[in-house]
Image: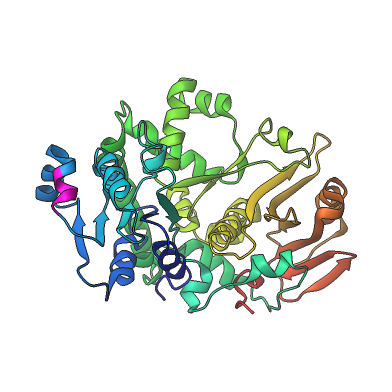
Amino acid sequence: MFRRNVQPAVEEALADTPAVMVVGARQTGKSTLARLVMEGRRGAEYVTFDDGGALDVAQSDPSGFISARSSPLILDEVQKVPALLPAIKAAIDRDRRPGRFLLTGSADVLALPRVSESLAGRMELVTLWPLSQGELRGHREGFVDAVLRGERPAARGDGEGVVDRLLRGGYPEVVSRPRPERRRAYFDAYVTTMVKRDVRELADVAQPEALKRLLRLLAVRTGSLVNHSELGRTLGLPASTLKRYLALLETLFLVHEVPAWASNRGKRLARAPKLHVADTGLAASVAGLDASLLARDRSLLGPLLESFVAGELRKQCGWSEAAANLFHFRTHGGQEVDLVLEDARGRVVGVEVKAASTVTSADLSGLRGLAEAAGKSFVQGIVLHLGHEAAQLGPGLTALPVEALWAKEG
């Protein structure tokens, strides 16, 4: 089950880059991945800054800490010692051999003040999200590359299994817990720890409970357009505080933005992004949703299912050969497509998500609008649904079960 889809990317980066940093939320397997990658590398040393002694030494003398150690060197939870990064930069400038440093961090340290330029051009970043559905099944998914080539992945759906998958999410420790009560207990403790420890290590948060309320609100509204003014009013927070708290949640990989797509790249920045909670198991737990509630009210399932698909696509974009990026599409006239894949060649695929077992012509309006806007760059439009069968809906338009997302590569 372990990170077979991400490990090759880390090993490839270490082969030609002096430093590689694996970042992601806590408890997604970064430390275990780092140890696996470094197994068999002669003289490799592992240091974790969850160890108070190592943390004290590194903070008091960053340059001495680095120079006293040989490479390859694994530094775990390096966000705790941002002053260490300039020392690593200096060490690399003296010796640019590849594979010298493998760093892990539970926060995006490159988003922290005065850190972003320290290792520019010297380090490659690999993001480790919670386990993908393919990883849980022991294979590498090929959905993103296949649909950008114009292919239609084969799959047969069972619908109800999808709901169970999104309620479990992808945190390694949670997916093995069969009882929903035990999963909720894990997530309750996880969020409390994040607010009391991890957030305070990164920033001075005057209202930690407000940060938890913000996460809960985002879980209820996952997949919605970002509206800072409305969120601030709902929570009673000034706009500046709200934006800082949102940035913290994103830095900790608890939420991720999906920017708007437009044929004119200059217009993309002017349009609001969507915000998704990165793991639907966490989102459902924080929002108080369970299988019985989702069965009674499909309107609650829709946003969670969209975030589930967004998360799976983002994970696959991390290893896709097409180097794809993820967007959403929305016009002033009201046409929408939940998710848009665009690769380095400019090829575009629209992905609409429906929490239903059937697809109607009304579900295709947004995809047709995207096809018109993208022109010759449009490859195909896909509606992912909870039904059992695939169906051709028209030229370049296909309905597929959600299970097609984790179809095996090749």
**Image point (36%, 45%), residue name:** 107
Q: Write down the quadrant of residue 203 in the picture.
A: top left
- Position of 246 with respect to 209 (left or right) is right
Q: Describe residue 104's horizontal placement relative to residue 220 as left or right.
A: left
- In the figure, is residue 308 to the left or right of 362? left
Q: Quadrant of residue 384?
A: bottom right
Comparing 195 with 126, the one in front is 126
> Residue at the location (28% across, 39% down)?
86
Give residue 103's quadrant in the image. Answer: bottom left
Q: Which quadrant is home to the C terminus? A: bottom right
Q: Decide whether residue 213 is among the magenta residues.
A: no
Report the front residue among 375 and 16.
16
| Main SS of residues in magenta | helix
Above/below status of 82 relative to 105: above
Q: Residue 66 magenta-drawn?
A: yes
Magenta residues (range): 64-68
Residue 126 x %, y %: 44, 56
Q: x%, y% of residue 346? A: 74, 53
Q: Do we see residue 76 in this rendering?
A: yes
| Residue 109 image point, x, y percent | 36, 42
Q: Residue at x 57, y 24 (%)?
A: 229
Q: Is residue 302 visible?
A: no
Residue most extreme to the front = 94
185 versus 215 height, above or below = below
